[in-house]
Image (tube, rainbow, N blue to C red):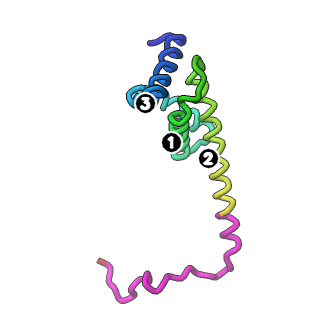
């Protein structure tokens, strides 16, 4: 097991290798090392496994894009934690907005109105179940 200082240095070196040379192996190592941490941080905030997976992907995509801009010597874990919190918050807002929109759209539909099938999509009443 790595000590905290060695782990921080190793993470910083991996990130530097990825930023400087595009080392997929270095980035893969970072993802393998920290994906559980990112996922469970998002899951605690979102309480939704699907959204937590999405947040994890968003965070690592962001890390890949911003790797060259991150300060040397900074904590990768700290950056991942903050990025996870922001990503989870944004996904929760989007989910709430979608839910509000769906609720409003449902309320606006007139009562007794049934969805109509387009002519080419209507089920054939004469067809038998297979």
Tag shown at residue 97: none
* Residue 22, image quadrant: top left
* Residue 114, image quadrant: bottom right
Q: Mark 1 points at which residue?
A: 53
Q: Where residue 63 appears, x then y in whole percent? A: 53, 33
- Depth check: give the residue in front, 108 or 90: 90
Contact, mark 2 vs mark 3 (Cβ under 8 Å): no
Q: Distance between the residues labelled 1 and 2?
A: 11 Å
Q: Distance between the residues labelled 2 and 3?
A: 28 Å
Q: Which residue is depicted at the point 49% across and 20% down? A: 11
Q: Name the chief secondary structure element in magenta.
A: loop
Q: Dot 3: what SS?
A: loop
- Nearer to us of marks 1 and 3 is 3
84 with respect to 16 (left or right): right
Assign the C terminus to one quadrant of the image: bottom left
Q: Where residue 75 appears, x then y in whole percent? A: 58, 20
Name the N-terminal-most of marks 2 and 3: 3
- On screen, residue 1 above or below 68: above
What crowding class fits label 2: few (fewer than 14 Cα within 10 Å), some (14-19), or many (20 or more)? some
- Depth check: give the residue in front, 84 or 62: 62
Q: Does the magenta stretch include residue 88?
A: no
- Depth check: give the residue in front, 27 or 94: 27
Q: Does the magenta stretch include residue 119?
A: yes
Name the N-terminal-most of marks 1 and 3: 3
Q: Dot 2: what SS?
A: helix
Q: Name the residue under label 2.
A: 91
Q: Which residue is depicted at the point 32% across and 83% down? A: 128
What crowding class fits label 1: few (fewer than 14 Cα within 10 Å), some (14-19), or many (20 or more)? some
Q: Name the residue under label 3.
A: 22
Q: What stretch is highlighted in magenta?
A: 102-129
Q: Where residue 87 appears, x then y in whole percent? A: 61, 40
69 with respect to 97 (left or right): left
């Amino acid at each position: 097991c790595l000590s905290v200082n060695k782990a921080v240095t190793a993470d910083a070196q991996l990130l530097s290798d990825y930023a400087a040379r595009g080392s997929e192996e270095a980035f893969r190592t970072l993802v393998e090392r920290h994906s559980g941490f990112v996922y469970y941080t998002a899951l605690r905030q979102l309480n939704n496994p699907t959204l937590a997976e999405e947040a994890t992907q968003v965070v690592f995509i962001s890390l890949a894009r911003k790797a060259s801009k991150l300060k040397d010597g900074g904590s990768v874990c700290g950056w991942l934690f903050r990025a996870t919190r922001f990503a989870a918050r944004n996904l929760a807002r989007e989910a709430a907005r979608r839910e509000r929109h769906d609720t409003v759209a449902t309320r606006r539909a007139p009562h007794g109105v049934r969805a109509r099938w387009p002519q080419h999509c209507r089920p054939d009443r004469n067809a038998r179940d297979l």
